[in-house]
Amino acid sequence: MRSLLGDNRWVHPNGAPLNQTQRLRDLERLATTTHDVLVVGGGVSGVGAALDAATRGLTVGLVEQRDYASGTSSRSSKLFHGGLRYLQRLELGLVRQALAERDLMARTLCPHLVTPVSFVYPLIHPFWERFYVGTGVALYDLMAGSSPLPHHRHLGRKTLTSLAPGLRGHRGGVRFWDAMVDDARHTLMLARTASAQGAAMATSTRVRAVSGQPGWMSVEIADLETGSKIEVRTRSVINATGVWSDGVRSLNGGVGHGVRPSKGVHLVVPRDRIQSDTGLVLRTEVSLLLVIPFGDHWIVGTTDTPWELGKAHPAASRRDIDYLLSWVNTVLATPLTPSDVVGVYAGLRPLLAGESDETSRLSREHAVSDDGKGMISLAGGKYTTYRLMARDAVDALSRYLERPLPRSLTHRIPLAGSGPVTAGTPGRLVTRYGTHADDVLGLIREEPALGERVVDDSPYVGAEMVYAATHEGALHLDDFLARRTRMSIETTHRGTEAVTVVADLVGPHLGWDPPRRRIEIDHYLARVAAERDSQTRPDDRTADAARMGAPDVRTGAAE
């Protein structure tokens, strides 16, 4: 196949498969090839940078200490959006950029992953509040320009009651539209696209040391699956590790940006617990709270509080859960209770530190810095603008390269799975796999038993687990249940009732012998038990201590 910039024997049509064979092949490439750039971090900005660099004709490697999107990029609000709260703070440039990126995703880059979703801002005060909110949402639409999404509408009390009978105490509302996306699956499709364009990709690899000089660097990485060490030679490094970026920057003798982690907690509740055909936006004392339709569930979030403890597994406390429930219950006719919550997840936003601002007021603008020694570091930013962050990081590499750097092309490169889908393909598979849904259905045709659900209370079937092992780079049960699927937050048992079936399905493809299978199951069960325990604790410190009671399945990954 031909890449966008010429012949490349690593290019694959419509998304390269990610699996153990690919990982071992790419580890060998990392060890034997001098790269133009090594990207550290497999979240959305890191994978986006790998794709951007590869499509400009650079030789690219990427290493990630856990799994694709295992950190912040699987724990967002699941939206491509401009951000009304940033509009409220008059960060107009950020909002305009984000809206343009939202619409680019919906039109061109990954329409199969994007679902339009409406929100209503319920009004309590009929006059001034309608003017205030309506003006802001009208500006939101105006800044989006010729968007594929509908424009906002004003709703009277009767219309809103019909649309959302579960609300109380309102006097109508303002309805507007944004776009929903499963963040982990989107990051995965980015990874498959980057691999298809020739990037060498390896998860379960941690950077241990960085040395050398501008234009010629040596990076020592550890393979966390085997314990072996690999030396990677590269002309430059992009540090896209989010809340870990200051630590990675220090490996090369650099000074950090002063990234300040902010914890965002989301609750997941069944769809039938809130009677509404639209999402909701509520104003809290410090920010906005969203109630987001997500398949058969609602996502309620988010908090925005400083976090100074372990970065790997931020814990949601009982205080966080009570806070979210108390705010959403201010507008619900039938209040939610803790027993309605089937899933909870917490993530850390890598915000740029301010003088004395609270994290809820810090900007989501991103920064790109060059330490002058070959390392480019990303900090800040938001999920929706990942492509711009990646572009800016790759632009900054030019001084370390031996040839001119072409302009970014990612604004016109559809992601893996984009394209016409076979008629009759189930809609649920289309929104998860796009054109790759045919591959999943092919597994079922070969082995009909793979078409059966893994567990009765979740829609995922056996073929999806097998496909995650053979084409989507999943290596551990946590990868299958928390990111390739969402059983860890969408079921009351949080995936524990699926572990035996999933281990039996994927074990043969991953070479698991009985002891390895037992280790995987025990690790996942311990993880869920620790999370449940943490969510009963009163504050961050006690919740973090409880969550850290479960060891990481990838021994040697940073905390």
Image (cartoon, helix red, strand yellow):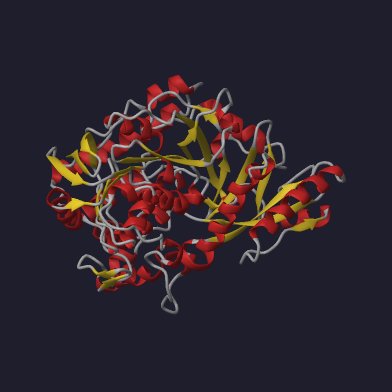
Task: List x then y, in percent, for residue 2.
Answer: 27, 73
Q: Residue at x 44, y 77 (%)?
A: 424
Taking depth in this image into account, of 133 and 520 the one nearest to the observer is: 133
Residue 164 visible at all: no
Q: Quadrant of the N terminus?
A: bottom left
Outermost residue, bottom side: 423
State left or right for residue 68 relative to residue 504: right
Task: List x then y, in percent, for residue 180.
Answer: 54, 56
Q: Quadrant of the C terminus?
A: top left
Q: Is residue 464 placed above or below 207 in the rendered structure?
A: below
Task: List x then y, in percent, for residue 19.
Answer: 22, 56
Outermost residue, right side: 127
Taking depth in this image into account, of 335 and 153 the one nearest to the observer is: 153
Taking depth in this image into account, of 65 and 282 the one nearest to the observer is: 65
Q: Residue at x 27, y 40 (%)?
A: 65
Quarter holding residue 15: bottom left
